[in-house]
Amino acid sequence: MTTRPLYVGIDLGTTNSTVAVFDAEEITLIRNSLGSVLTPSVVRIDARGNVTVGARARRFLDTDPTNTRSEFKRLMGTTHQLEFPASGTVRRPEELSAEVLKSLRQDVADQLGVAPQRAVVSVPALFELHQTAAASNAAMRAGFERVELIQEPVASAIAAGWTQGGSNGPWLVYDLGGGTFDVSLLETREGLLRVVGHDGDNFLGGRDFDRALMDLAIARLAADGVVIDRANPQHARALRQLRLAAEEAKIELTRAGEAPIFIAGLDVDGQVVDVDLVVTRPDYEAAVGPLIDRSLAICTRLLAANGLGDGALERVVLVGGPTVTPLLRERVRAVLGADFGEGLDPMTLVAQGAALFAGTVALDGRPAAKAPPSTGPKVWLQFPAMTSDLTPFVVGKLLEQANTIKQIKISRSDGEWQSEPTPCEADGTFAVMVRLLARQNTSFAVQGLDGNGQAVTLQPANFSIAHGITLGDPPLSRSIGVALADNRVQVYFNRGSPLPIRRTFVLHTVETVHPGTEGHVLKVPIVQGEFAWAHLCRLVGTLEIPSTELSAPLPVGSEVELMLELDRGGQLRAQARIADLDRIFDQVALLMTPQVSLEALADALNKLRTRAADLSRAAFLDRSGKTAARLSAAVPRLDEAEQNIRAAHGGDLDAGEQARRMLSDFDALLAEIEAEQAWPELGRKIEESFAMAVSWVAGHGNDAERSTLNETYQACKRAFVARDADEVERQRAVIERLGVAAYFRHPGAWEWEFERCAARVGESTDVRRASELAAKGREAVRQRDRETIERIVRELWSLAPVDHDEQKLGHGSGLRKR
Amino acid sequence: MTTGDPLALWRSNPFFVLEVATDATPTDVERAGQRLLALLTVGSANVQTYPTPLGPATRDAEQIRQALAALRDPEQRVLHELWASVIPAGGQASANGNAGPWEEAERALGWSALWAR
């Protein structure tokens, strides 16, 4: 095994985790010490501090639940601390995930004799930045020195594409895991696998199926006078026992027509009862049907968003334990109208794909071998470790002592093919097309030829390329940007942008930061979401520029060159360069979702209910049936959130986290509806902007501007009729810019603008500086020095007051656009 | 259509960036992208610029990835094929934003009629 590459892929699941390895030709699933390829994602820490992982730990979920933790994946990236009272320790979710990864790494070492140093770990496609960062940290804690993340549906698709080969056209990966639901639309053409788009629900999974069955059992028991309350912490143990029994019944119901839920001696408020219920498959299907429908609504939304109608799919690949549910398979087939990919193991497909992906990015897990003794000139080779192209390019550059090499020749190790001698460019670079063996890992030897055509051994002298699939860059699942002090968002990467990606914008500070002022920090909040307003997007990280690290004042209006970069797995890097201070800041802090108190959640829930009721009333009065229908379809999510808050009171941390997300999504939905209800107001704004622009452009614009203004106004009206709010705003901004440009051509404009700014000096962010500027400006006005007036006005603009309410909504951002 | 430099879009047409013909197969496109990315990685000076009908333009790895992503999407590809193919035959377009292929392309896409409504 060690002579071949060791590409390691890990599916870090909510319920179970799996590790697979790929040696450039075959995939092997690694068995744990109990002989299973599935390791339960369960961690136990006993009184002596010993850590147990997997099936051995899972046995204690019932008898020692306070020291045994499961389903912590859904809490990754939050500030939750999970207690293990027997040992008196607390662990964060990512530390527990690290224990699972460590255990899987050891399984590889036990089976193959090599502890891998590098691996690919899968994460749900809809994981947010702080969650992917937590997954990456967990892998590093587990002892991996380098890790790449891959989106789970992409991993499933790679594995399905590898196993089934050949087919062309669009297909769907329906991935219902223990805790998350991901659906991805993919396309294969000539071996190129492309993710067209994805959607999903970070809080829909097999666990919700267990809950539905558990609620059924609770209702039956209540009818018999045994009341189990999810909100009562005293009932936590009974609930855990019930859930384990429900999970077993759920598995049985995938094969049998009925299943028992039997628990001997369940203790409820001191009353000991034997639970003996029978659940039939129709009962179960009635309970989980709405969950399946929820997942299918997401699938059809994804297909519609990509212009695909009925019957367009080539096939559907099912991934995850819950997809063995007969009703689910039936409904998926009926709604999506495509056959399932056969012969694919839904439980291990993700790990297999992750291992294959490690192959495509040449992430060999073997510890680096000692460099061989120097035997010739060095060459830097670049080639795809795996590709669908049978004739890819091998590119290289000759490094030191290589000036005698004039040509390059590459030979296949089977002796059946060799390249023509290819001349090297003056800078030592070359590109040679090579011929691969189909569906194999092909080895090649590379040689240099000197001026006399004599062969020269290079180092490295050999390399190999596997023929398989080519993976298109995965698209970003949610837009990412920086919140500004006016509560708007500077979008950096739009949803769907291919990863990796990097972009830089220049922004400006809204206040002066003095060096050494304890606690004073310039915040750069990084947000994720599709809304123009920062408070509706999720805060996923903050780059902080603390005053304690400044050696000189950072004045208001200073330029900050802010770069954001995302890798293929969705890991973020941010860097702020302040040219005036010649400093670079790159510490992204607080990549965690803060814990919100249950009281605050309950309060938010009540406010959302009131807002939703007001909007429903307004929709009724406006006879807007569409809005009323949207609201009535969404309101049950509030009931669900309320149930989750109650469960969180009973000790279910995950339910609390789920409630938080649901309320946040609901808030965004209401904001969208409010924006729609304010639509006539937007129409008035367009007319106002146009009237202002026309008056100035007519007098001071040129022909091109007049014509552009007319075109833009027509485009704006068309967008208004199409109810495309983003396009309306974009066109309205153009109208305003045209008006402003013409206004400033008026000979008195800069003077008027100066008077307007001078009147608000007292509100400036730096009153002293603004007062000085106002005095100088008055002198310039007296002397009719228009150049100086313009310069002063521009500086006064940079000192314009910040609306602190908006800044607060903008996550406390210290930046704005000029 | 009313803002920005239309010629900038022209210069960054994915077919020009990747130096492939508009009838290139998906495999040809991927191979060209893979070769250019690899050459840029090793610091080849020869691939840092590419020819366009408006004169040479510079490219980086991100532009190449964006171009690959654009041509992998059939809908985007059709649009870029159209833009790349409406260059007036036998000469370079003018660098002046008011002349050159812009109006011709607009007409080819049927957008002029749309604006006139």
Image: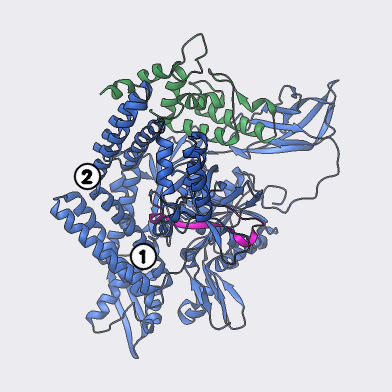
Chain colours: A blue, B green
Q: Secondary structure at mark 1?
A: helix
Cβ–Cβ below 8 Å for labels 2 and 1? no
Amino acid type, label 2: Pro
* Badge number at residue A680: 2
The subunit letter for the residue under badge 1 reads A
Q: Which residue is mark 1?
A: A208
Farthest residue, direction bottom:
A270
Residue nearest the observer in this picture, A328 or A654: A654
Residue range in magenta is A533-556
Give the left or right position of residue A182, taking residue A158 as reference.
left
| Residue A709 image position (x, y, % from top left) | 33, 28
Vertical placement of residue A273 versus A26, above or below? below
**Crowd around label 2: few <14 · some 14–19 · many ≥20 (10 Å):** few
Give the left or right position of residue A493, taking residue A108 as reference.
left
**Residue A404 inside the magenta-drawn segment:** no
Farthest residue, direction top:
B90
**Which callout, 2 or 1, points to the residue nearer the camera?**
2
| Residue B74 image position (x, y, % from top left) | 42, 30
